[in-house]
Amino acid sequence: MPQIPEVTTVPVSNGDSIIKPYVLGHGTLACREINDTRKFYQEFLGLETVRHGPRSFAVRLGMKFHIFAVEIGDEIEPVPFLNHWGIDVTSKEEVDAAYAKTVELKDKYKIRQITEPSLQHGVYSFYLEDMDYNWWEVQYYEGNFQDEDLFDFGDLF
């Protein structure tokens, strides 16, 4: 059985990105064209990527956790709205600034849809659908780190 690392976070490296998240929270993804998707993940979302295969790359942000994005071409299909990745920023103002930049750069990064920022399920956020039909929630949680609170509260149902 592998040992759990003592440190579960890695330094965030997104200094020049549009959105300034501090953690990759939740979701799932696939991609049509690996180079465009990787550029969007790095330049726009501020995620760290490494490419180890001809049709795949790994993604992470702020934690010793990663996901693989695999190029599947035209076989890609829309993903349901509730099946999304969440990225956290440090204030409501950052959500609003990220929303404004998302609207401004929608065509450059081939963003399909953008929802208005709103307060829902305990966070202030907006959603965007990327070129690969993946949904991203840019959110601010006033309690600092939602993951800790979710598990500290325990089962409610």
Image (tube, rainbow, N blue to C red):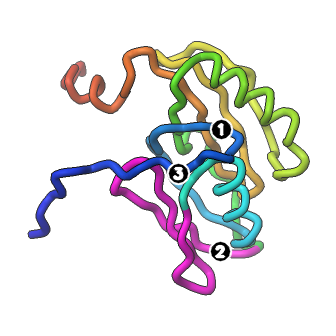
Farthest residue, direction bottom = 54
Farthest residue, direction front = 15
Of tags 1 and 2, the one toward the viewer is: 1
Where on the picture, by quarter, is residue 128? Answer: top right
- Dots 1 and 2: beta carbons under 8 Å? no
Tell me which amino acid carries mark 2: Glu
Q: Which residues are magenta?
A: 49-73
Name the quarter where the N terminus is drawn.
bottom left
Residue matched to label 1: 19
Q: Residue at 88% across / 50% down in the picture?
A: 108
Tell me which amino acid carries mark 3: Ser
CA–CA distance between discs 1 and 2? 24 Å
Residue matched to label 2: 71
Q: Is residue 69 magenta?
A: yes
Horizontal relation, residue 127 to residue 61: left or right: right
Lower position in the chain sequence, tag 1 or tag 2: 1
Q: How many marks?
A: 3
Lower position in the chain sequence, tag 1 or tag 3: 3
* Figure check: 73 above or below 100: below
